[in-house]
Image: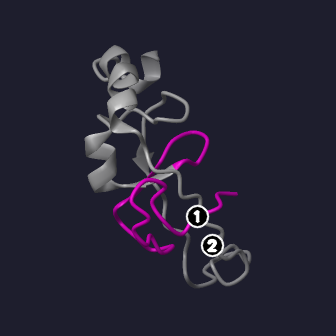
């Protein structure tokens, strides 16, 4: 199940479990929508694209699968991006759809 990391890896903006501006790549690297734009939808860690992070239900609607039983992670991964270095990677990949990378 997704960790639901608590902050943007780049700017450290708080991204609670119900944040609508949280984006993740396939490795769950987590960024806010503002940083995803600056990154040209290219993950600086793996080169993949981003998708909106799903919202885990706050209430138990079915089978005990909810935020109370499976809480969001409290462990932040703050890894500020070197945007000058990232531009080289983004230049190669930003015009390639994520499913073709």
**What crowding class fits label 2: few (fewer than 14 Cα within 10 Å), some (14-19), or many (20 or more)?**
some
User: Picture quarter containing residue 26?
Assistant: top right
Is 59 a magenta residue? Answer: no
List x then y, in percent, for residue 99. Answer: 45, 22
User: Picture quarter containing residue 89?
Assistant: top left
The kind of secondary structure the magenta stretch mainly shows is: loop
List x then y, in percent, for residue 23. Answer: 42, 52
Residue at left 27%, top 54%? Answer: 34
List x then y, in percent, for residue 2. Answer: 64, 57
Tell me the tag on residue 72. Answer: 2
Tell me the tag on residue 58. Answer: none
List x then y, in percent, for residue 8. Answer: 45, 60
Residue on which disc 1 sits: 4
**What crowding class fits label 1: few (fewer than 14 Cα within 10 Å), some (14-19), or many (20 or more)?**
many
Is 7 a magenta residue? Answer: yes
Label 2 and label 1: CA atoms lie apart by: 5 Å
Tell me which label, 2 or 1, sits earlier in the chain: 1
Residue at left 48%, top 30%? Answer: 48
| Tags 2 and 1 touching, CB below 8 Å | yes
67 vs 73, nearest the viewer: 73
Residue at left 62%, top 72%? Answer: 72
54 vs 82, nearest the viewer: 82
Task: Identify the magenta region.
Answer: 1-29
Residue at left 35%, top 66%? Answer: 20
């Amino acid at each position: 199940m997704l960790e639901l990391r608590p902050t943007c890896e780049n700017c450290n903006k708080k991204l609670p479990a119900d944040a609508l501006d949280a984006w993740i790549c396939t490795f769950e690297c987590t960024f806010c929508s503002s940083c995803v734009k600056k990154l040209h939808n290219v993950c600086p860690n793996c080169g993949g694209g981003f998708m909106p992070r799903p919202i885990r239900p706050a209430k138990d609607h079915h089978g005990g699968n909810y935020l109370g039983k499976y809480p969001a992670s409290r462990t932040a991964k703050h890894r500020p991006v070197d945007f000058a270095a990232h531009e080289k990677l983004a230049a190669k990949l930003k015009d390639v759809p994520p499913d073709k990378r």
